[in-house]
Image (cartoon, helix red, strand yellow):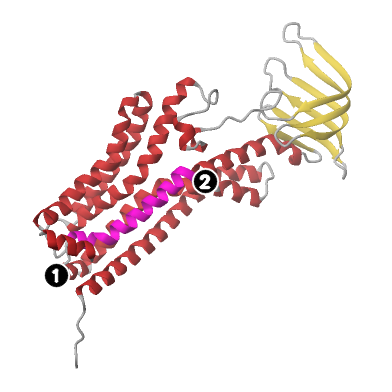
C-alpha cells in the first residue's frame, strides 16, 4: 500500500473550509431561528389589527415582516459569538481541536475561519445598518400611517359601531353596492371640550388614503354647551367629516431617526428636526457605524475563551462563562454609552471604544506572542497559506 503525501498548504485549506462551512451554516441556522422567534413574539401586537380592525393576513405579514431587518442587525453580533463559542467548544470536546494543534496549527491558523465568518457578518451588519434597516423602517412607518388613517375607508360595516379610534365611533345602518352609506351616526370626541354627535340620512366616502372623509347629506350636528348645559343642534344639507384618528385636518407624518440615512443624521435638513434632537441624531449615526464592529470583537472574545489556556480532558466551563459575562457586559455598556452620549456628545468616542478595544485586546492576547516570536520568513509563509 502506498501512502500519498499531503501538502501542508492543502491540509490547511481543507481545515479552513471544514471549519468555515460549519461556522457559516450554524450562523445561518441560529440567526434564522432566533429572528423567527423574535418576529413571532413582536408580531403579536399586530394581531389586534386583524381581529378587531378586519385587516387581511397579507397586510399583517407585510407589516410585521418589515421589522425583520432590524431584528437581524441587532442579534447578528450575538449569534456570531454564540456560534463561534459553540462550534469551537464542540471541537475541543471531540478532541478535534487537540488533533489540529498537534499538526502544528497555531491559534492564528485555527482562528482564521471564525474571523472570516465574523468579517462576513460585519459586512452584512453594515449593509443592514446603513441601507436596509432605514428603508424598511421608513416603509413600516408609512404603512402604519396609511393603515391608521385609511382604516375607516374599508372597515365601515353595516349595523356595526365601528371604533375608528379611541375618540371616534361610526355607525352605518346600510351600505349600498355602489358605496353609498345610509343611516349614519358619528360620535366625535376628538375635541374633548366640544364633543359632538352627528346624524345623517346618507353619505359617501371621499378624500385621499391619508385623510379619509365622509360626505354627509341631510343631517344634524348636536353639541352640548358646557357652560350653559344647553343642547345646540345644527342642521345641514351637506357636510364633510374627517375620519382621521387625530384632530380634524390632515395628519402630518414626521420622520423618525430610525428611518433617516447617515447623511441626514449627521447633517439634518433645516426645519426637519427640533434643535434638542440633533445630538440624538449624531449619536444614532455613530452607533450605526460602530455597532457592526462588535461582531469581530465578540468573535475574538469567544476565540480567547476556547484557544487560550491549557488543555482539559473533561473540558471546562469557567472560560466560556467568563466570555459570556464579558459579552453581556459589553452589550450593557454599549446601551448605557448611547444614552449618555446623547446627553454629552464628548462621550461619542467611547461608543467606538466599546466596539473596537475588546477586539484589539483579545487579538493581542491571542496572537501577540505567536507573531512576536515568529521569524519574518515564517510570517510571510503563514500569510501565504
Query: Which residue is at a point 19% across and 69% down the rendered structure image?
Result: 100
Quadrant for the C terminus, please: bottom left
Q: Position of residue 144 (x, y in %)?
A: 61, 39
Horizontal placement of 241 versus 74: left or right?
right
Return the mark for residue 270. none
Name the residue that disc number 1 marks: 102
Query: Which residue is at a point 32% across and 35% down the rendered structure image?
Result: 351
Q: Considering depth in this image, is 276 or 218 the residue closer to the camera?
A: 276
Query: Which residue is at a point 87% across and 45% down the rendered structure image?
Result: 177
Q: CA distance from mark 2 to mark 1?
A: 47 Å
Q: Residues within 10 Å of mark 1 (few under 14, many from 20)?
A: few
Quadrant for the N terminus, please: bottom left
Does the magenta stretch mainly form a helix, a strand or a loop?
helix
Horizontal placement of 275 versus 158: left or right?
left
Picture quadrant where residue 225 is located: top right
Q: Does 222 lie within the magenta span?
A: no
Q: Nearer the viewer, mark 2 or mark 1?
A: 1
Q: Secondary structure at mark 2?
A: loop
Mark 2 or mark 1: name the one nearer the start of the chain: 2
Q: Position of residue 327 (x, y in %)?
A: 28, 45
Magenta segment: 107-131
Is 298 located above or below residue 170 in the figure?
below
Return the mark for residue 67. 2
Q: Residues within 10 Å of mark 2 (few under 14, many from 20)?
A: many
Q: In the orientation shown, which residue stands out farthest toward the top?
A: 228
Query: Which residue is at a point 20% across and 48% down the rendered structure image?
Result: 362
Amino acid at each position: 500500500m502506498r501512502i500519498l503525501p499531503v501538502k501542508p498548504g492543502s491540509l490547511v485549506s481543507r481545515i479552513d473550509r471544514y471549519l468555515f462551512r460549519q461556522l457559516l451554516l450554524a450562523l445561518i441556522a441560529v440567526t434564522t431561528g432566533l429572528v423567527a422567534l423574535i418576529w413571532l413574539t413582536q408580531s403579536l401586537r399586530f394581531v389586534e389589527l386583524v381581529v378587531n380592525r378586519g385587516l387581511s393576513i397579507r397586510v399583517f405579514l407585510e407589516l410585521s415582516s418589515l421589522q425583520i431587518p432590524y431584528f437581524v442587525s441587532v442579534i447578528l453580533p450575538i449569534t456570531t459569538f454564540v456560534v463561534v463559542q459553540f462550534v469551537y467548544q464542540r471541537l475541543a470536546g471531540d478532541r478535534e481541536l487537540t488533533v489540529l494543534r498537534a499538526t502544528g496549527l497555531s491559534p492564528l491558523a485555527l482562528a482564521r475561519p471564525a474571523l472570516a465568518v465574523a468579517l462576513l457578518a460585519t459586512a452584512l451588519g453594515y449593509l443592514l445598518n446603513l441601507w436596509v434597516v432605514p428603508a424598511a423602517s421608513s416603509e413600516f412607518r408609512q404603512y402604519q400611517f396609511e393603515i391608521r388613517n385609511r382604516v375607516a375607508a374599508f372597515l365601515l360595516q353595516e349595523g356595526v359601531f365601528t371604533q375608528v379610534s379611541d375618540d371616534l365611533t361610526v355607525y352605518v345602518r346600510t351600505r349600498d353596492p355602489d358605496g353609498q352609506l345610509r343611516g349614519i351616526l358619528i360620535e366625535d370626541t376628538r375635541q374633548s371640550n366640544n364633543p359632538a354627535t352627528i346624524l345623517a340620512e346618507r353619505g359617501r366616502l371621499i378624500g385621499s388614503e391619508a385623510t379619509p372623509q365622509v360626505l354627509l347629506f341631510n343631517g344634524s350636528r348636536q353639541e352640548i354647551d358646557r357652560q350653559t348645559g344647553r343642547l345646540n343642534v345644527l342642521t345641514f344639507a351637506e357636510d364633510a367629516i374627517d375620519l382621521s384618528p387625530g384632530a380634524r385636518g390632515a395628519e402630518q407624518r414626521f420622520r423618525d431617526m430610525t428611518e433617516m440615512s447617515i447623511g441626514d443624521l449627521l447633517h439634518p435638513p433645516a426645519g426637519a428636526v427640533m434643535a434638542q434632537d440633533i445630538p440624538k441624531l449624531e449619536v444614532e449615526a455613530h452607533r450605526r457605524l460602530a455597532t457592526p464592529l462588535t461582531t469581530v470583537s465578540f468573535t475574538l472574545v469567544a476565540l480567547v475563551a476556547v484557544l487560550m489556556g491549557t488543555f482539559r480532558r473533561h473540558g471546562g466551563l469557567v472560560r466560556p462563562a467568563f466570555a459570556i459575562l464579558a459579552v453581556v457586559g459589553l452589550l450593557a455598556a454599549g446601551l448605557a454609552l448611547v444614552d449618555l452620549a446623547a446627553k454629552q456628545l464628548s462621550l461619542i468616542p467611547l461608543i467606538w471604544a466599546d466596539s473596537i478595544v475588546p477586539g484589539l485586546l483579545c487579538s493581542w492576547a491571542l496572537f501577540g506572542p505567536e507573531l512576536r516570536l515568529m521569524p519574518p520568513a515564517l510570517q510571510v509563509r503563514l500569510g501565504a497559506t
